[in-house]
Image (tube, helix red, strand yellow):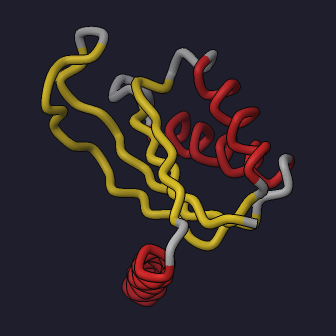
């Protein structure tokens, strides 16, 4: 199992429920392929560097996961056919320095989730 980071930019025209459904769909596609999701960073709506399909903004989400290498091809194939996804890419963490950064990013996402849950309560 290798460590990966998958960034997905979702269309800004979707409602919050539809965006949540797209993120859930990505996570379920990963788990179907044998991935273990470490953390999800929902970055929110952001300005794009350039317009994509006449959209100047997009909803950014990063999913940190550990998965087999062949699972990435299938997940990216499904993302390619999803019309609600503007862009996506996957980064593989391979050496010790990159793996340490992966763990750091996962810890940062986990602490953000915990603090937001405490704020809601």
Outermost residue on the top side: it is 54
Q: Decide: is 38 above or below 79.
A: below
Q: Nearer the viewer, residue 88 or 73?
A: 73
Is any atom of residue 121 visible in this view?
A: no
Is any atom of residue 11 visible in this view?
A: yes
Within the image, what quadrant is residue 53 found in? Answer: top left
On the rendered structure, is 81 left or right of 89?
Answer: right
Q: Nearer the viewer, residue 6 or 119?
A: 6
User: How many callouts does the rendering have?
Assistant: 0
Percent coordinates x, y for residue 66 in the rendering: 69, 66
On the rendered structure, is 65 left or right of 30?
Answer: left
Q: Nearer the viewer, residue 61 or 33?
A: 33
**Residue at x 59% of width, y 20% of height:** 80
Q: Decide: is 68 above or below 46.
A: below
Q: Decide: is 39 above or below 116.
A: above
Percent coordinates x, y for residue 63 in the rendering: 54, 57
Percent coordinates x, y for residue 113 in the rendering: 46, 78
Percent coordinates x, y for residue 2 in the rendering: 68, 65
**Residue at x 22% of width, y 30% of height:** 57
Q: Decide: is 78 above or below 29.
A: above
**Residue at x 54% of width, y 15% of height:** 83
Q: Quadrant of the N terminus?
A: bottom right
**Residue at x 46% of width, y 39% of height:** 89
On the rendered structure, is 40 left or right of 118?
Answer: right
Within the image, what quadrant is residue 17 found in? Answer: top right
Outermost residue on the front side: it is 95
């Amino acid at each position: 199992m290798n460590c990966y980071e998958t960034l997905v930019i979702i269309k800004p025209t979707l409602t919050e429920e539809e965006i949540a459904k797209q993120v859930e769909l990505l996570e379920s596609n990963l788990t179907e392929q044998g991935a273990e999701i470490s953390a999800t960073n929902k970055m929110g709506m952001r300005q794009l560097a350039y317009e994509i399909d006449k959209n100047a903004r997009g909803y950014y989400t990063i999913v940190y996961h550990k998965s087999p290498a062949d699972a990435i091809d299938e997940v990216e194939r499904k993302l390619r056919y999803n019309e609600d996804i503007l862009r996506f890419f996957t980064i593989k963490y391979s050496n010790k320095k990159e793996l340490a950064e992966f763990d750091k990013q996962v810890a940062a996402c986990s602490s953000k989730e915990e603090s937001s849950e405490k704020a809601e309560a």
